[in-house]
Image (spheres, helix red, strand yellow):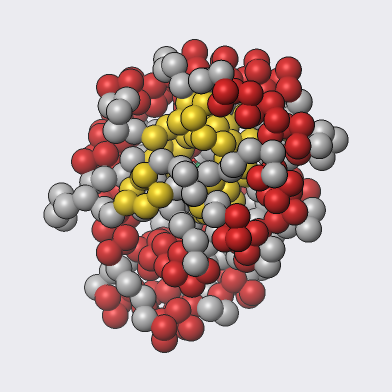
């Protein structure tokens, strides 16, 4: 593994310059089973050495613990790191499958103060609306977010899991730097209307779960059998039962392409996500999540892997064959509202 840094890209028109791959920090405190905190901290540092500069968290990850976890790292490298966090979603402590979504101004103002305090910083580089509350006009929500920019609490705005129409309405109120949505070899619903809207508006796409939450790497094959009981992936229809078995078969062409390059299936998945920048003509900054140094090295190296047109064609049919939705309840995704 060389220590040469990954290349950079502007995160949306007028947005910050970031490494072409970011780091998802969620799993360091939340959702994906037990964590080695020392290794996770070392992973944050290793990523930065490799030129990864966009770090992704949210207030809901670990009920605030994830923001607290990344805080010392962010404070130590304040000028190098572009820190992204999110508001809108809260989970029930007793039953984390129960969720509340709020997009109203008083709630946003309360959330930003709480995130700034947990992170121990003066300004959030990129502040996302995590999920859409359809009872609040998006213009009102983005208006309240724009106030935070004017007040110097936030530098750039982002949205997650919004439709193309919602993105257009938002951009009419204030520039949106980035749209974060699920996008991978397994999840391509955003290509119908969200990606074209982002391209037209100069908004960068930040694919979350670009490794299909780890399934595309082959690191687990069936959530029921391979993951701990508290792992969030056990609630996801495509990773359990017969769906998981059928979906594991779909990885065959990914392995074939990987072998041709002496790469791993995960690297092929990341290269595919990265290459959507050329395919669709917009900035794309995937944020694979990992808590391990060796994996962040492997993932960063994938930014240098270029797939041929023939390989892209071989991978093309996979998404349409995936069995099971990407969430148990799709109402909270852009696809659920299109
Ligand atoms: N906006 C949203 O609604 C939303 C939703 C989900 C996630 N996100 C953000 O997106 C980030 C990434 O998504 P994600 O974590 O859900 O999924 P992902 O990046 O597709 O996959 C993460 C999983 O893959 C494993 N992994 C990572 N690199 C690997 C490698 N090279 N080889 C084998 N396994 C590897 C990780 O395990 P280890 O950690 O053990 O390496 C983890 O279990 C999150 O951290 C979060 O910041 C946002």
Residue at (76% x, 37% y) in the render: 139
Residue at (26% x, 58% y) in the render: 301
Q: Point out the image quarter for the C terminus.
A: bottom right
Residue 253 at x, y = what percent?
44, 79
* The one of 205 and 2 positioned closer to us in this rendering: 205
In the current view of this chain or complex, which residue is farthest to the bottom?
A: 310
Q: Is residue 145 visible?
A: yes
Quarter holding residue 71: top left
315 shown above or below 140: below
19 shown above or below 74: below
Residue 47 at x, y = what percent?
28, 42
Residue 6 at x, y = what percent?
26, 53
175 shown above or below 57: below
Q: Quick check: 240 left or right of 24?
A: right
24 shown above or below 98: below
Residue at (56% x, 18% y) in the render: 151
In the current view of this chain or complex, which residue is farthest to the left?
A: 2
Q: Quick check: 306 left or right of 102?
A: left
Residue at (49% x, 13% y) in the render: 117
* The one of 190 and 34 positioned closer to us in this rendering: 190
In the current view of this chain or complex, which residue is farthest to the right?
A: 135
Q: Point out the image quarter for the N terminus.
A: bottom left
Q: Is residue 248 visible?
A: no
Quarter holding residue 128: top right
Q: Quick check: 269 left or right of 171?
A: left
Residue 209 at x, y = what percent?
51, 52
Quarter holding residue 37: top left
């Amino acid at each position: 593994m060389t220590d040469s840094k990954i290349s950079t890209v502007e995160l949306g028109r007028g947005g910050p310059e970031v490494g072409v791959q970011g780091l998802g920090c969620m799993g360091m405190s939340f959702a994906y089973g037990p964590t080695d905190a020392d290794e996770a901290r070392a992973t944050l540092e290793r990523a930065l050495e490799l030129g990864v500069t966009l770090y992704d968290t949210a207030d809901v990850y670990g009920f605030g613990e994830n923001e607290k976890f990344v805080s010392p790292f962010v404070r130590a490298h304040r000028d190098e790191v572009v820190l992204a966090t999110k508001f809108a979603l809260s989970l029930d402590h007793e039953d984390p499958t129960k969720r509340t979504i709020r997009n109203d101004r008083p709630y946003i103002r309360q959330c930003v103060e709480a995130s700034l305090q947990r992170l121990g910083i003066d300004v959030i580089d990129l502040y996302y609306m995590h999920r859409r509350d359809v009872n609040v006009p998006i213009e009102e929500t983005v208006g309240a977010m724009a106030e935070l920019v004017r007040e110097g609490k936030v530098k750039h705005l982002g949205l997650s899991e919004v439709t193309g129409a919602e993105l257009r309405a938002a951009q009419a109120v204030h520039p949106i730097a980035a749209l974060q949505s699920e996008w991978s070899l397994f999840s391509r619903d955003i290509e119908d209307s969200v990606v074209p809207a982002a391209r037209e508006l100069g908004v960068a796409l930040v694919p979350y779960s670009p490794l299909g939450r780890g399934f595309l790497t082959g690191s687990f094959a069936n959530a029921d059998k391979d993951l701990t009981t508290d792992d969030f992936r056990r609630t996801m229809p495509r990773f359990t039962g017969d769906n998981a078995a059928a979906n594991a078969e779909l990885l065959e062409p990914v392995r074939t392409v990987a072998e041709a390059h002496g790469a791993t299936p995960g690297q092929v998945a990341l290269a595919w996500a990265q290459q959507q920048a050329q395919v669709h003509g917009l900035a794309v900054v995937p944020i694979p999540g990992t808590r391990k140094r060796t994996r962040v090295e492997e993932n960063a190296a994938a930014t240098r892997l270029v797939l041929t047109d023939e390989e892209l064609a071989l991978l093309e049919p996979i998404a349409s064959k995936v069995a099971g939705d990407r969430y148990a309840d799709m109402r909270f995704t852009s696809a659920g509202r299109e």
